[in-house]
Image (tube, grey):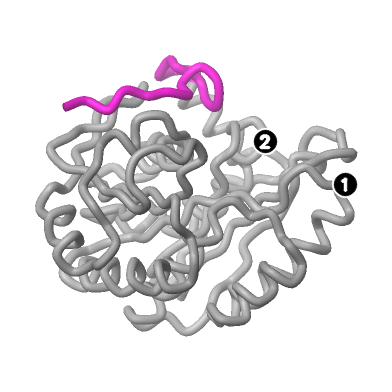
């Protein structure tokens, strides 16, 4: 089956040339990473990336993607929240290609089958993936960054509690051990708060992410009521990366929609983080 794009023409341009130009503009943006190549010997196990419209969150997302630009993975494991609450609690899919203006990317059906066997919570269900943007917006960025052919393993979450994240994190790390992989946690941070408050909330939540302390992460999330939508994706990625040998997170960039647009009354926070 072909998984058709649902937010092309809204969150990012629906024509190849325009999409290419927009991503280049995101790199050159004042909140973007620029185009200067920075060589790093760090093994990066995973990244955290926002998933809003590229005009708002693209410059931040490019920091994460630039950090892994020399890796050319054979598999990108993309984990994100199910905003529509449809389908299974945690779902991957198989026998599918994801369509974008850059062409199609194959789902790694073998990895999907394997992860379902290793997990107690992940099920195969293409319907869960049919409406959401959280994974979709990562795919054109991956296609833009990596010259080699790669496959994807999409995992979408309705359940985002700690036990679920532990299960997913373990299963993802087992898949990633056998392949040249990158893990992408797709999440925005604080939603619809005043800009300076969003900065404070998100700074508090980013701290345990950089420490890779998943219990503290859930504690801060609950205590401060931080409205990060893909917290389970971040936690699963932290756990998987730790299992693979990562020892810390590094903050590459943080900005809000208000920083980018100038409208600071009600903003969404975006963070780019790598796990090394």
> What residue sits 75% from the left and 67% below the top?
203
Residue occupying the point 57% across, 47% down: 50
Disc 2 on helix, strand or loop?
helix
| SS at mark 1 in the image | loop
Q: Quadrant of residue 94?
A: top left
Which residues are drawn in magenta? 1-18
| Residue 107 is a magenta residue | no
Image position, residue 274 (x, y; %): 51, 66
Q: Is residue 10 above or below residue 238?
A: above
The image shows residue 19, relative to residue 58, as above or below, that is: above
Q: Is 41 on the left or on the right of 93, as rendered?
A: right
* Residue 270 locus on image (x, y percent): 66, 50
- Residue 86 point in image, percent of width and height: 40, 37
> Which of these two is toward me, 238 or 273?
238
Front residue (pair 134, 19): 134
Q: Residue at x 45, y 17 (%)?
A: 14
The Cα atoms of the two marked residues, 1 and 2, are separated by 16 Å
């Amino acid at each position: 089956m072909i998984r058709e794009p649902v937010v092309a023409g809204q969150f990012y341009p629906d024509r190849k040339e325009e999409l290419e130009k927009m991503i280049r503009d995101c790199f050159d943006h004042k909140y973007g990473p620029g185009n200067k190549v920075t060589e790093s010997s760090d093994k990066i196990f995973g990244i955290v990336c926002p998933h809003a419209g590229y005009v708002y969150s693209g410059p931040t997302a490019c920091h994460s993607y630039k950090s892994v630009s020399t890796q050319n993975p054979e598999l990108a494991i993309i984990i994100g929240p199910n905003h529509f609450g449809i389908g299974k609690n945690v779902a991957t899919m198989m026998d599918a290609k994801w369509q974008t203006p850059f062409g199609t990317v194959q789902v790694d059906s073998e990895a999907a089958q394997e992860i379902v066997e290793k997990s107690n919570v992940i099920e195969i269900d293409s319907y869960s993936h049919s409406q959401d943007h959280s994974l979709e917006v990562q795919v054109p960025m991956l296609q833009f960054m990596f010259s080699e052919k790669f496959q994807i393993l999409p995992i979408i979450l309705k359940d985002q509690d700690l036990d679920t994240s532990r299960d997913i994190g373990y299963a993802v790390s087992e898949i990633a051990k056998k392949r040249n992989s990158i893990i992408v946690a797709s999440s925005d941070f604080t939603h619809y708060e005043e800009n300076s408050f969003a900065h404070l909330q998100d700074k508090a939540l980013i701290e345990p992410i950089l420490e890779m302390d998943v219990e503290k992460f859930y504690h801060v999330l609950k205590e401060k009521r931080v409205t990060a939508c893909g917290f389970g994706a971040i936690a699963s990625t932290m756990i998987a990366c730790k299992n693979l040998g990562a020892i810390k997170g590094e903050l590459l960039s943080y900005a809000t929609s208000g920083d980018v647009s100038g409208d600071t009354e009600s903003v969404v926070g975006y963070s780019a983080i790598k796990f090394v």
